[in-house]
Image (cartoon, rainbow, N blue to C red):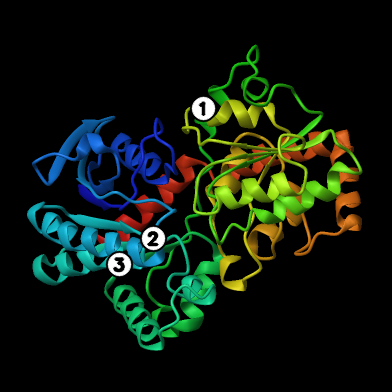
């Protein structure tokens, strides 16, 4: 069977960014599926005379179109890139014969090329919902025009109606879909959370090397790692406020923030203004998925943060699953399914929405409980292996494919 995988931001492990699509695609290929991927890239290497550049690697065929993009762009400019991609990708999909299309958001517009291919060639598609989009972007005020909001909700409904199956990445995302569109309750909806890529995180570190010491100059007593985007929805200013309270209680607790994004410069300035930059807050450039396991290995805890907007709590952030794959406790600051999982499985710590000296004291006390940290580390890996491994995700997806074809 041939699957055409549509993902605007597909990444190999050697690149900076999430690799869910790569992991799934290679997992499908190992099961005998023929996989072609249609994606975009900001790499100038692909800025060639030909609009589409074809690459064969790791058993996959990848079709690239050069469309510069970054979290630093305004929502308007990012929207233009979205529409450029859906225009060119629609024609590309029509030109490739396949048994099934797997379209993964964000953005929601990724469903349009899949819709067009279905309507013209009768090719079924699976829609993977990585976010409650457009619900989330409307909730944070990114789209204020009421007519555009209605149009996006209409597009969402049409995509869900025409999809042969829907794959939300969390139980909260599924609830959002069926609560707003109860007519789709009978449609195949399979929750397939993000992936804890155990092989990569357990086999890719060096016990005799200290990448952390190379990057910040020393090895702290307790290190919290944030490896992700410095974007509006992440609210990393929260970490700086936490660090400011923590440093007066225990300066041996250190926060290492790795990544890029629209708010990185602002966060760096905030850390400087608060007197914590390069003291107990270190802000570093992004690293590839190949380097990331070493940093998780050396740190004591991973983390994931979002601003206090209910619609964002359904997220299925890579950071959560990478932390578990590395066998480390996870630190978050919001309610939702991740909080429920952390508390029911005892695999981390949930901070309150607002930081004060009392919350900081409680967290510092937690970091000093060595026995609890060790227990949670063991349990985190058990949860990753038992619930979120690549093998489990691939088998769930194959079950979805078999229901359709």
Residue 186 can be seen in this image = yes
Estimate the spatial distance between the alpha carbons at disc 2 and disc 1, rounded to whole Å.
25 Å
The image shows residue 204, relative to residue 9, as above or below, that is above
Q: Residues within 10 Å of mark 2 (few under 14, many from 20)?
A: some
Place of residue 299 in the rendered image (x, y in percent of width and height, measured from the top left): 70, 31
What label does residue 403 carry, if any? none
Residue 332 makes an appearance in the image? no
Image side of residue 395 versus residue 281, left or right: left
Which residue matches tag 3? Answer: 109
**In the displayed structure, would residue 398 be above or below residue 258?**
below
Residue 384 lies in what quarter of the image? top right
Asked whether the beta carbons under mark 3 and mark 1 sit within 8 Å of each other, the answer is no
- Count neighbours of disc 3 (C-alpha within 10 A) and say few if under 14, some if 14 to 19, many if 20 or more: many
Which x, y percent locates residue 174? 50, 69
Q: Which residue is mark 1?
A: 291
Residue at (25%, 37%) from the top-left corner? 44
């Amino acid at each position: 069977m041939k699957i055409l995988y549509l993902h605007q931001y597909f990444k190999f492990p050697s690149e900076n960014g999430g690799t869910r699509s790569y992991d799934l695609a290679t997992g499908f290929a190992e099961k005998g599926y023929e996989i072609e991927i249609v994606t975009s890239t900001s790499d100038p290497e692909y800025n060639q005379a030909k609009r589409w550049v074809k690459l064969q690697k790791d058993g996959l065929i990848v079709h690239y179109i050069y469309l510069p993009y970054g979290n630093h762009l305004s929502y308007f400019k990012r929207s233009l890139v979205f529409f450029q991609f859906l225009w060119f990708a629609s024609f590309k999909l029509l030109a490739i014969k396949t048994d099934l299309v797997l379209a993964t958001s964000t953005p929601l517009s990724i469903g349009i090329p899949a819709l067009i291919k279905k309507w013209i060639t009768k090719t079924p598609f699976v829609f993977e919902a990585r976010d409650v989009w457009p619900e989330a972007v409307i909730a944070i005020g990114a789209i204020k025009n009421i007519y555009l909001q209605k149009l996006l909700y209409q597009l969402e409904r049409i995509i869900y109606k025409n999809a042969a199956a829907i794959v939300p990445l969390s139980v909260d995302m599924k609830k959002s879909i069926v609560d707003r569109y109860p007519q789709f309750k009978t449609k195949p909806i399979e929750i397939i959370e993000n992936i804890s890529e155990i092989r990569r995180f357990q086999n890719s570190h060096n016990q005799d090397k200290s990448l952390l010491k190379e990057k910040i100059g020393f090895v702290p007593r307790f290190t919290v790692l944030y490896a992700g985007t410095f974007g509006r929805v992440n609210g990393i200013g929260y970490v700086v406020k936490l660090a400011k309270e923590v440093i007066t209680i225990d300066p041996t607790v250190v926060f290492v923030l790795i990544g890029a994004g629209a708010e990185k410069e602002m966060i760096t300035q905030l850390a400087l203004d608060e007197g914590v930059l390069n003291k107990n807050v270190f802000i570093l450039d992004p690293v590839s998925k190949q380097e990331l396991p070493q940093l998780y290995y050396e740190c004591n805890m991973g983390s994931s943060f979002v601003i206090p907007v209910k619609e964002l709590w359904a997220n299925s952030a890579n950071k959560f699953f990478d932390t578990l794959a590395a066998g480390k406790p996870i630190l978050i600051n919001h309610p939702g399914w991740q909080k429920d999982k952390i508390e029911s499985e005892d695999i981390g710590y949930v901070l309150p929405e607002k930081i004060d000296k009392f919350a900081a004291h409680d967290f510092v006390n937690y970091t000093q409980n060595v026995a609890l940290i060790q227990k949670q580390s063991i349990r985190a890996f058990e949860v990753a292996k038992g619930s979120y491994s690549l093998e489990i995700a691939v088998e769930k997806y194959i079950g979805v494919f078999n229901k359709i074809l």
